[in-house]
Amino acid sequence: MTLQVALAMVILALTVALFVTERLRVDVVAMLVLGSLALTKLVTPAEALSGFSSPAVITVWAVFILSGGMSRTGVASLIGRQILRLAGTGEVRLMAVIMLTAGVMSAFMNNVGVAALLLPVVMDIARRTGNPPSRLLMPLAFGSLLGGLTTLIGTPPNILISDALRENGLTPFQLFDFAKVGVVVMLVGVAFMALAGRHLLPTRDMAKEFARAGHTDLDQVYGLRERLVLVRLPAGSVLVGKTLAESRLGSALGVNVIGIMRDNKTRLSPAADTVLRSNDGLLVAGRLDRLAELQGRHQLVVEQDGLSVERLASADIEVAEVGLSALTPFVGQTLQQIGFRRRFRVNVLAIRREDALMRTNLQNIPLQRGDTLLVQGPPVQLEVLRDTPDLLVSKVEAAEVYRLHERLLVVRVPPDSALAGKTLADSRLGDAFGLTVLGIVREGAAHLVPEATEELMAGDALLVEGRPEDLAALNGLKDLEMDRQPPPELSQLETEQVGLAEVVLSPRTTLADQTLRQIHFREKYGLNVLAIWRQGHAYYSNLRDMALRFGDALLLYGPRDKIKVLGSEPDFLVLTEEAQEPLRLNKAPLAALLMAAVLLPVILNWLPISISAVVGATLMVLTGCLTMEEAYRFIEWKAVFLIAGMLPLGIAMQQTGAARFLADGVVASVGGLGPMAVMTGLFILTTLATQVMPNPAVAVLLAPIALSTAHDLGMSPYALMMTVALAASASFLSPVSHPANVLIMGPGGYRFKDYIRVGFPLTLVVLVVTLLVLPIFWPPTL
């Protein structure tokens, strides 16, 4: 083994390790690969950057745009709906039609886009026919994956495998070369799922309820009935006269107020500015243990107010001003998004903006250039701020400007307070009530700038910054009375104006890993998130601070017109057809014509697919089928950068001999058993690799190994490359192996084991069919 081969193998091993551990995003890993190959001189600078000009990469992003044009103009939706209407109500027929529809559409569109497009349609069919979504959504995802096997543009691995043949001086696969094997694989896969695989799909007890009002399924799935309770607001409560937002009920208790019963009438989905009145009955949904522990207890008792700013400093704590320059990256972000308290370990007491002064709810105020922050913290942490570029730290010259004496309070934790024994983080004093704990006095000793993990004790005196009315709202929670009468049925909470809806993050979302609080979901859309379904479990509390994941299903409650507004947001996919974004149906014939115009010259070998796809994508924008902003949005940039960064590794493996080295291992293991054994081994290796690595990366890495193996054994490179392409796209074994699988996980309520139980036999079926059919069209021996 030469030094160059060793370097290439080390980079390959580290790349696989990073993909498996998921410590970094896959596109970041690809960029690290690109840089390391250039720095170690395993490839030239031009070769390192060649992925961005590769015909394969260009074809991939152009096909994303073409797929987007078909989606936005309604071509794909119209075709899908018309075909699915013929499916009837029987499960076998319905499953077969769904899979075939998704498969045919995925032959010419991005398969994740097809799954997202048909997801609301299939959900509506499930509700209408009485079939659980769990019986239909996995077939939808698997059908889209099987359809991608049938054409060159059906999936990125097919494009990459064909381009690898071209790069090595061989004739690349043409548009419908994959159909010779792929169509047979798809048909057999559909037949297996409809006849045998369906018996492996999960079924829930509430399936028989689906045909009723169209929403009882949500009640059963999320267990809402047991999470509803009626809370009475007695006369004389300090919460009377406050708005729902001012009462802090939602943020303090982790519940949603979904209705107010007043004067024998129920007002559903009340707005945040609704004023509470005496004897109001509040219908709340969520975990009720926090409400129970607060009843009848004073949480904090005010001992002193009107304190001076000098109380905030000591020998170990200082107060300073921090100015934001025009170049700071913090502009436009909130303190919550920056993680300012956690990052710099200081308290922000106030924000001064020209003549305006802000002293409450500071965590959710977007910062602007020129803002001045008044901060409190240890000198060493202020030095950290001084060393941060574009932050200007200075002494406080005029503390009276901030009028902190109006916001500084000393409060005591009484013996019966529910806060005793909780950490500052668990107390939610800051998140729920905007009260910042600046210090704790315990047994005569003052501890300023306490950590979030500091545990409160009965008798503690807390130096807090906040409004007295917010503190009153906290203590007012003890007045709430849990009504003994049973809450209304969920069906009574839906009207023509107000209702429930399920939503998932769309494949084009930019909100993954952000919380509902960070995106201001309630304020922006006016909808309550009652629960989040994730990997087979429903979560009801602290939803505002849960980082959203692709595949989550959110149960929403609110005005139907606002649900429809949410359906037009590109970050969300509402799981009902009536809430979908309006389509440009007048452009549908033109989009279909453009797609045909892209395919025709490729079929007749007049143009390479990369040129034809780029011209077609451009015409989609010029003719108004898509706007340029939508075109950019439909491109899966993560996939583009992933492929562009990984292609140089394929070049390095070939040029250094690393591919030959690995191919020798394949030959030594199964080469003596014959061509069929080699194809089997390569299929299994590729399939296993796709469970821990993105399938485009798998195609890039295994293509040179397949070519070297074919050369060493005197086999046809086309047979082995086709095997790699088919196996790379047969991602059925886990939800993380393909985005289409993740997309349907939440709405279907699937668990990880469901994918293994159904996907493993389907993978065996695809393997057997591939071994039987592929040699007919691509004989493995020369």
Image (tube, rainbow, N blue to C red):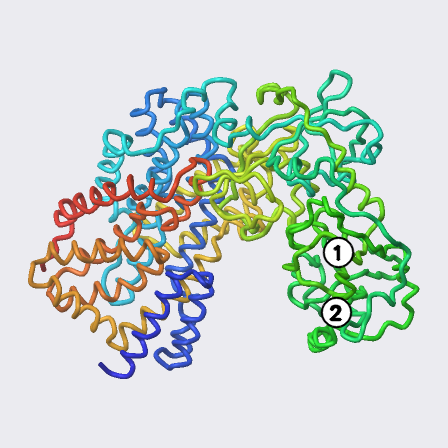
Q: Which residue is mark 2?
A: 377
Quarter of the rendering occupied by the N terminus = bottom left
Crowd tier of the residue under label 1, counting other residues whose Cα lies within 10 Å: few below 14, some 14–19, many 20 or above? some
With 411 as the anchor, is 157 left or right in this view? left
- Screen quadrant of the C terminus: bottom left
Q: Quadrant of residue 262?
A: top right
Estimate the spatial distance between the alpha carbons at disc 2 and disc 1, rounded to whole Å. 21 Å
Give the residue pinned by disc 1: 460
Q: Which three-letter amino acid code belongs to the residue tagged 1?
A: Asp
Residue 88 lies left or right of residue 276; in this view the side is left
Where in the figure is residue 201, as x and y percent of width and height? 32, 33
Q: How many other residues sit within 10 Å of disc 2, few (<14), some (14-19) or many (≥20)? A: many
Q: Is residue 467 left or right of residue 596?
A: right
Q: Give the image location of residue 642, x and y in percent.
A: 42, 61
Query: In percent of the image, x 44 and y 75: which residue is there?
Result: 35
Q: Residue 756 sits in which quadrant?
A: top left
